[in-house]
Amino acid sequence: MGRQATVSPFSCIRRRVEFDERPWGNYLVLDEGPGYKVKRIVVYAGRRLSLQLHRRRREHWIVISGVARVTRGDTIGDLQPTESIDIPVGTLHRIENPGVEPLVIVEVQHGDYLGEDDIERVADDFGRT
């Protein structure tokens, strides 16, 4: 009788840690695979990411702690912990932290290409446009 192959429950654990410090805060890639990437993003008090869009991915943001001020298209609104929002492909967006404590979100990206160079910056507080 042939031996049945088994899949380790740990086969999806990332072997390489991807952490990046940015002028607005930092991110840590928690998991990724074909067509998806999951990040923990920390935005420092009073800081914001660039006003940007992506051509090849959509994003879903879930607020873990703090208050997120979100620009999506021509709409701006605040999200509280446990609230979430979808950012469709090609939609102008930004997240900022209007509070005094760090903002923590989980971002789930989906698309055929998830590289950091799929960012079109329209406005940026740090001169990266």
Image (spheres, helix red, strand yellow):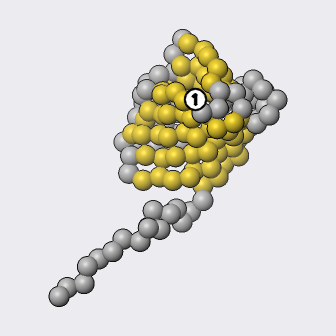
Q: From what the image shows, is residue 67 above or below residue 31?
A: above
- The secondary structure type at the circle numbered 1 is loop
Residue nearest the observer in this picture, 126 or 60 = 60
Look at the image and tell me whether residue 121 can be seen. no
Tell me where residue 50 sits by quadrant. top right
Q: From what the image shows, is residue 2 above or below residue 86?
A: below
Residue denoted by label 1: 83
Tell me where residue 46 sits by quadrant. top right
Q: From what the image shows, is residue 47 above or below residue 26?
A: above
* Picture residue at 62% right of the left edge, 24% below the top: 79
Residue 12 lies left or right of residue 3; in this view the side is: right
Going by the picture, which residue comes out furthest to the bottom? 1
* Picture residue at 61% right of the left edge, 16% below the top: 77
Amino acid type at circle 1 is Glu
The picture places residue 10, in percent across and down from the top left corner, at 47, 68
* Picture residue at 64% right of the left edge, 32% below the top: 81
Going by the picture, which residue comes out furthest to the top? 74
The picture places residue 52, in percent across and down from the top left corner, at 56, 26
Other-residue count near label 1 (Cα within 10 Å), few / some / many at <14 / 14–19 / ≥20: some
Which quadrant holds the N terminus? bottom left
The picture places residue 87, in percent across and down from the top left corner, at 48, 27
The picture places residue 7, in percent across and down from the top left corner, at 36, 71
Q: From what the image shows, is residue 78 above or below residue 13?
A: above
Residue nearest the observer in this picture, 25 or 38 = 38
Look at the image and tell me whether residue 32 can be seen. yes
Tell me where residue 68 sits by quadrant. top right
